[in-house]
Structures are given as C-alpha cells and as structure tokens.
Amino acid sequence: MPGYHCNWFTRMFWLHWFELDHVYLHPSRRNYLEHAFSPVKAFNGRNHFVIPYLVQIPYYVWIGKRQSAQPLTDSSKQSGWTRLPYNPAKPEHTQFSTYIYGFTWEDPQADIAALDLQSGDNIMVITSAGDNALAYAAHTNGLTIHCVDMNPCQNHLLELKLAALSTLDYSQFWSMFGIGRLPNFKKVLDTELSAELSLPAYQYWRSHLDTFASNTSNSLLASLMSLGRHNLYTTGYSGLALRCLAVVTKLLGVSKDLEQISGASSLTDQIKIWCSRVSHNLLSSTSIHILDNPLAIWRLMGVPSNQLKMLHDEGSMSQYVRDTLDPVFLSTHISTNNYFYRMLICQQYSQTCCPDYLTKPVFGKLQEIARNTQDTTFNIHTATIVDTLQKMRPGELSKAAIMDHMDWCTPDEADAEIDALKTALKQGGFVLWRSAARIPWYVANFKALGFKVEAISVRQPNTQTALDRVNMYASFYKATKP
C-alpha cells in the first residue's frame, strides 16, 4: 500500500525520537495488527509539523475486524461491484502515480450501437475513467461488466464514482463529477464514501484530497500560470493536457472564440466562428509541431510511440489533426451534444451537456445498481487484459470493447492478447476496437487466428463528417469469433 514503508533515515530517526518519550514504534506492532485482525480501512500519511513539507512525521490510521471476518486477500465486495485483489508492488502498477484519463475519451453512443447489448451479456471493457462502463450498465439491465486497467488509479476513480452513486444524493454527485469540486470532500470521504471503498482506493483518495478541494497555494499557482480552474478534470495526465490547452489557446488568441463556440446557440453560429476565427490559428504549424513530439503527445494525450508510428505510416500529424477537428466542429453542436469537446474548452460539464451518468434520471438507475447487494454488475480488475482473460472460463465472455489498446501493443503482445480473447469469447462473441490507423496492422493477426474482421467505420482524409462525437480515431473495427 502506498506510504506503508519509510526510508531508512526517516524510520530510524522517528523510532528513536519517540523512544525519548517512552513510545516504542517498532514495525512489529503494525505487522501484529495485520496478523491478528483483518484490515477494514487503513490510511498511511505524513503529518506536516512546524515547517510544512520539510518536517513530516509518518503516521497511520488502522481499523480492523476479528479474523473470522473476510480476510484481506479476498475480493473487496462493495454492494453492486467487486474490486478484485492485486499486488500494488508489481512494476506494472508502481509505474503509475495518478490516472492518465480523468474522463473517458471514446463515445459510448457508438459503442452501444455496435455492442447490441442484451441482458445476461458478460462483457469486458477497459476502465479508463469508468464513464463508458457506467453508460453500458445504464443502457441495459442484467449485464456483468469486467472493468480492466493496469493503472490502479483508473480503477480508484471508477470505485469512487460507484461509491458516490451508492451513498450520495444527486446534488453532491453532480458537484463531484459534473463540476469536479466538492469543498467538504475530506469529510464526505471519511464519513460517507470510505465504507464503500477498497483499502487501496481509500488510501489513494485520502492522499489526494486536493483533487476536489484544492488548497489556497495550489489555486494561487494555477491562477498565476493562467491554467484555468482546479478540479477533478484538471488533474492526472488528461488534466495536464487541459491546462496546457488553455495556455496554448490563450497564446494563439482563440480562447475567447472557443468559449463562444462552447455556448453557441446553433450549429450555424458555431461553424461561422470555427471557420473564420479559430481553425487556421488552432491548426497552425506551431500547434502541430508540439503534438508531433513523442514525449509531448504521450504526456498530454496518452498517445504511445507505437500508436504515433501507425499514424505517421498512413499520413502526417497535420492531416490527422485536421481530419479529427474539422468534422467535429462542422457537424456536431458542442454546447448541447458534444460534452467531450465542451470539456476541453470549459474544463467541466454543464447540466445540458454531460455524460448520461451525470443526468438525474440515469443517476437514479445507476444508484439502484450500485446499491444492489445481491448482484455484482461491475468486476474491477487491476491487471493486464491477458491476465484477466486467462482467469476466465473458456467461452465465458460475450463481448469486449478494448478502445485503442491494440495500437499500444507489439506484435508478440498482440498475438498473446488475440489468442486470449479467442479462448475467453463464446462462439459468436466479438471484440470492438478503435485505431489511429485506417487499416491497423494487427487486423491480419485477428484473421490468422480465425476471427471474422469487419470495419464498422473508417475516416477518410479531408472528410467533413465525424465518425462519432470524439472523432479522434481513424477507424472502428469488430472481430467476431466464428
């Protein structure tokens, strides 16, 4: 668990310091607690004493039950979802200190149309920020949804949303995930949400209280740097991208124009602003040059080098960005029906333009699901896709939606994953994915293992019609197991 271990100097210094007052902090105390009792909640923190961030006294809060209670190594069952156990010390998890995506960047409307969800379906999705998994659950009753992510923080975010659905009223829920702020988040976390969170998720959010309730210094710094508001959506890697976008649009002189687009009353007005005042500035060579840098595009947009190569193999970054943005602003109304791009501009949602899970009617339905103690709708796996699939029974899975994940893979990784999908999927089951390439190289790998592959939609160069409300990817594919 993060914060559990101190370095040698800190451990020895405070051990001997407290011995002067006859307080003995031998590590065996904590070990004995966890041996004799089953942990229920724990928090490892630092007390910023005298000089904040210079003198930090380690401490922990620990609550446990008698050993007859559920042991720590079992799954963490919380109402309508289960967080499967994982080892936070494994390298694939320790590489992440925060989430990459504070909001999901793929359109659930297009997914739902292609998935043809039926009651009883057993589906696997990549967690991301959890938005699309919630959309699927709200759309069709009786689903079992396996949410998979190697990044523990993405699953912590989904857990927080489920815990909030289970315990909070709509106004609090909207404040947290619509506006992205809740001034009394610490109190709400400790008194209402904590009982519904797994140990790792509670530890994470208890250590990141300023996500929803920033302190004065952070707010002042953000203001000085003109990076916009501080809330949930300006945290994580995607939050860095939003803040940098605010700076870039200000420097390019289009920030006010984009604000007008976000509130435009008609698509006609939006198109007029985009074509006359925004497009040629925002799509300038300077902006394209920034995005064409492998480090920048990874940090700002979560695009790995493998995916960037696929993009370059079929064209240029300039063409790709134009084919992404022009159709969105020419064919979708941002202020009423495109919460993805409104988020980029405003850094928060509005009551009239937001994901379905944030609307009051869908909130009520999801609250019933989250509070259901009989059925588990969500199984949350902190693992790789291959590890998750290999633990399933052959033919257990109905459908899978793996976003653009295959673009990240090497050929060997792709073969291993496709083989695992073939085993886990039932006959007639299928997998959906998106790609930065119009014809991804791994289509041949799916076909070689017997899948029937079809392109649901492919974006053509210089088109003015968006594939969906995000339109970030060049293609959308389906592979069916015969």
Image (tube, helix red, strand yellow):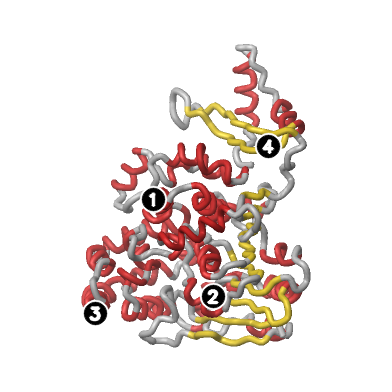
Tag 1: Cα neighbours inside 10 Å, few (<14), some, or many (≥20)? few
Q: Nearer the viewer, residue 210 or 145?
A: 145
In the picture, the quarter occupied by the C terminus is bottom right
What amino acid does circle 4 point to?
Pro
Quarter where residue 238 is shown: bottom left
| Residue 270, percent from left and from top | 25, 75
Residue 481 visible in image: yes
Q: Secondary structure at mark 2?
A: helix
| Mark found first going from the N terminus, 3 or 2 | 3
Q: Nearer the viewer, mark 1 or mark 4?
A: 1
What amino acid does circle 2 point to?
Lys
| Residue 122, percent from left and from top | 66, 69
Residue 412 visible in image: no
Cβ atoms under marks 2 and 1 closer than 8 Å: no
What amino acid does circle 1 point to?
Ser
| Residue 72, percent from left and from top | 72, 42
Q: Nearer the viewer, mark 3 or mark 2?
A: 3
Q: Marks 1/4: CA distance?
A: 32 Å
| Residue 39 badge | 4
Q: Nearer the viewer, residue 8 or 68?
A: 68
Residue located beneath label 3 in the image? 268
Q: Nearer the viewer, mark 3 or mark 1?
A: 1
| Residue 470 badge | none
Q: Please, is residue 83 above or below residue 15 in the view?
A: below
| Mark found first going from the N terminus, 3 or 1 | 1
| Residue 309 badge | 2
Farthest top residue in view: 21
Q: Marks 3/2: CA distance?
A: 36 Å
In the image: residue 235, left or right of residue 1 = left
Tag 4: Cα neighbours inside 10 Å, few (<14), some, or many (≥20)? many
Residue located beneath label 1 in the image? 171
